[in-house]
Image (cartoon, grey):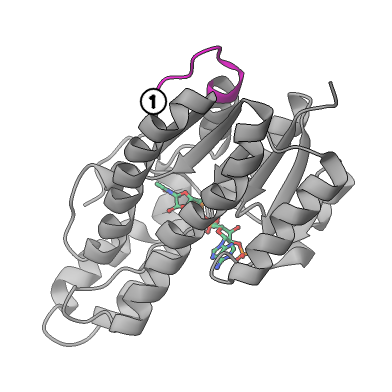
Amino acid sequence: MPAKTALVTGASSGIGEATALKLKELGYTVYGAARRTERLESLADRGVLPLGMDVTDDASMRAGVERVIAESGRIDVLVNNAGYGSYGAIEDVPMAEARRQFEVNVFGAMRLAQLALPHMRAQHGGTIVNITSMGGKIHTPLGGWYHGTKFALEALSDCLRMEARPFGVDVVVIEPGGIATEWGGIAADHLRETSGSGAYAKQADAVAASLSSEVNAKRNSPPQVIADAIGKAVTARRPRTRYATGFAARPLI
Ligand code: NDP
C-alpha cells in the first residue's frame, strides 16, 4: 500500500503548522494548505507539500483535493483546521463578516469533507478531524458569532460521524482550550475594530485584554499539544469521538 496521505488546512501557522509536521513525523505524505503560501516554505523544507487554498473558494478546494488524489491516489486524513475568531458584540459584527466567518469555520470545513468522502468511501477508510474549540461547548460574551461557528461544526461533525461510520470513515472532533498562536491577537483586533467604541466598549476592553497576543503567549499551551492529540486520534484503532485538550491555566475572562 502507498504511504498514507493527509491534508491539513490552515497549515501556514499555529495548530495547522504543528499538525502538518506531526503527521509528517508519523510517516504520512502531508499536504499543508493555506492562502499565504509564502508561509508554507519552511514546512516545504521539512517535507510537507505546500498547497495554496482558500477555504471560502469552492474551485480552490476542488483543485486542492484533485491534486492530492492525482499525486497520491488517496486521502486518508483530512484535518479541517483553518479558522479564526471574529470577535465583537453580536449587535456590532457586520452581517458580511459574520457570514464570512461561517464560510471559513463551517462551510469550508464541511465542503472539504464532502470532497474527501467519495475517496475515503472508495478506500474503505479515512479520518476526518474537525478542529472546533472549547468555544464549541461554552459561551462567552462578545464571542457569539465565533461560538456559533464552533457549535455548528460540533453538530455537523457528530451527524457526519454516524453517517460515515458504515463506510469505515471516522470523524473526530478536537476541542482546543487556549493555545498560543496568532488566533488570540486576530480575535482581539476584530473585537477592537467592531466594539472598541460605542455601547460595548467597556466589555470589549476586558475581553480584548484577555485575548491579546502577550497574554496568549504567557498563558496558553503550545500548539504541539493539539498536534499530539491529532496524532493520537489518527493512529488509534478506534479513535475517541472528541479530544478536549490544551486548557489555559487561567479562565478566558
Ligand atoms: P492561527 O491564526 O495561527 O491559524 C489559522 C489558520 O487558518 C492560518 O493558517 C490561516 O492561513 C488559516 N485560514 C484562515 N482563513 C482561511 C481561509 N479563508 N482559507 C484557508 N485558510 C485560512 O490560529 P490557530 O492555529 O490557533 O487556529 C487553528 C484552529 O484552531 C482554528 O479553527 C481556531 O478557531 C481553532 N482554535 C484555536 C484556539 C486557540 O486558542 N488558538 C482555541 C480553540 C480553537 P492563511 O491565512 O494563510 O490562509
Report the label total.
Answer: 1
Give the residues in magenta. 233-240
Identify which residue, 24 or 60, lies in the foreground.
60
123 in relation to 19, above or below: above
Whether 234 is among the magenta residues is: yes
* Side of 22 relative to 246 (left or right): right
Taking the spot 15% from the left edge, 74% from the top edge, the residue there is: 202
Which residue appears at 87% of the width and 46% of the height? 71
Is residue 1 covered in magenta?
no
- Quarter of image, res 64: bottom right
Instruction: Specify the farthest residue to the left.
Output: 199
Does residue 247 sit above or below 118 in this rendering? Answer: above
Quadrant that contains the N terminus: top right
In the image, 2 versus 208, the foreground residue is 2
Circle 1 sits in a helix, a strand or a loop, which is it? loop
Where residue 5 sits in the image (x, y, percent)?
Answer: 75, 35
Secondary structure predominantly adopted by residues drawn in magenta: loop
Q: Going by the image, does 40 lie left or right of 247?
A: right
Residue 2 rendering spot, x and y as whole percentages: 85, 26
Q: Which residue carries the number 1 mark?
A: 241
Q: Where is residue 142 in the image (x, y as percent from the top left)?
A: 21, 66
Q: In this view, does 31 lie above or below 203?
A: above
Q: Is residue 241 at all visible to an observer of this figure?
A: yes
Q: Horizontal and vertical percent for residue 76?
A: 67, 32
Nearer to us in this view, 163 or 175: 163
Q: Evaluate whether residue 81 shows in this view.
A: no
| Image-quadrant location for residue 157 | top left
Res 209 → quadrant: bottom left
- Residue that appears at 46% across and 32% down: 164
Cβ at disc 1 under 8 Å from ligand 1: no
Is residue 228 toward the left or the right of residue 64 in the image?
Answer: left
- Rendered residue at 64%/46% (across/down): 8
